[in-house]
Amino acid sequence: QKVAGQVDAQDVPKLEVHFPLCMKNLVTVLKKEHHLKHDGRMQFGLFLKGIGLPLEQALEYWRMAFVKMNDEEFKKGYAYNIRHNYGQEGNRKNYSPYGCEKIIHSSTGGAGQHHGCPFKNFSPDRIRAEVRAQNATVTNSEVEELVGLVTAKHYNIACSKYFELTHPPSAPQSGPTALTEPITHPNQFFELSYKFSHT
Ligand code: SF4
């Protein structure tokens, strides 16, 4: 389901503000290293498809992101996989974006691997820093409540709490933002965040 109509390659950076932490992490690595390993490309590429990036724009986005690679290398090693994700190659299966369940249980830990769920993979200190970077006015007790959910392995509830802490209401007297449903899908996080700032 698209929230912003068709998304073009050059729109993606403007929409990063609405990404959940798992995708923010991947796009940060992609910008720094101009590359992502296969599992990260699948997780992030299908998420981008879910926000409304069509195949031609996806090819353009990844071509720009892999700026250090020559055209031949990109075509041979990567363009096929991108088309495959959009059902245009191989078994022509039209792949869906991964939900939290799949991402949380994906195996990580290999060198240079950045896919997976940060609420499972990041240290408590890194989670503290991430939430403070998004909202400098967050209180210590709010941060520790979030960290408590992470250490209790309630990753989806931690992500929902992170959403609430990073989307404070414009009128503080109205109380904290409360989600009516927990986050169970990165594209749900994106859509709720997009709607939050466009209503
Ligand atoms: Fe991403 Fe889901 Fe983890 Fe949130 S709970 S960071 S949306 S995988």
Image: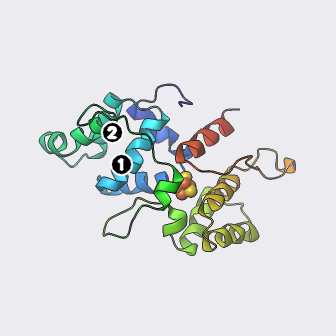
Horizontal side, residue 104 vs residue 124: left or right: left
Please give the name of the residue rendered at 46% of the width and 47% of the height, measured from the top-left corner. 98
Please give the name of the residue rendered at 42% of the width and 32% of the height, measured from the top-left corner. 53
Q: CA distance from mark 1 to mark 2?
A: 8 Å
Which quadrant would residue 94 be assigned to in this image?
top left
Name the residue at the top extreme.
5
Q: Quadrant of the C terminus?
A: top right
Horizontal side, residue 66 vs residue 181: left or right: left
Q: Is residue 191 above or below residue 186?
A: above
Which residue type does callout 1 highlight? Met
Q: Secondary structure at mark 2?
A: helix
- Please state which of residues 127 and 87 is positioned toward the viewer in this rendering: 87
Residue 60 on image: x %, y %? 30, 34
Q: Is residue 21 visible?
A: no
Residue 27 on image: x %, y %? 42, 51
Residue 143 on image: x %, y %? 69, 68
**Residue at mark 2:** 85
The earlier-in-sequence mark between 1 and 2 is: 1
Circles 1 and 2: CB atoms closer than 8 Å: yes
Residue 167 on image: x %, y %? 68, 49
Which numbered dot is residue 42? 1
Q: Quadrant of the N terminus?
A: top right
Please give the name of the residue rendered at 50% of the width and 44% of the height, measured from the top-left corner. 16
Horizontal side, residue 92 vs residue 129: left or right: left
Q: Is residue 130 visible?
A: yes
Which residue type does callout 2 highlight? Asn
Horizontal side, residue 77 vs residue 109: left or right: left
Which numbered dot is residue 86? none
Badge 2 local density, few (<14 within 10 Å), some, or many (20+)?
many
Q: How many marks?
A: 2
| Quadrant hosting ligand 1 | bottom right
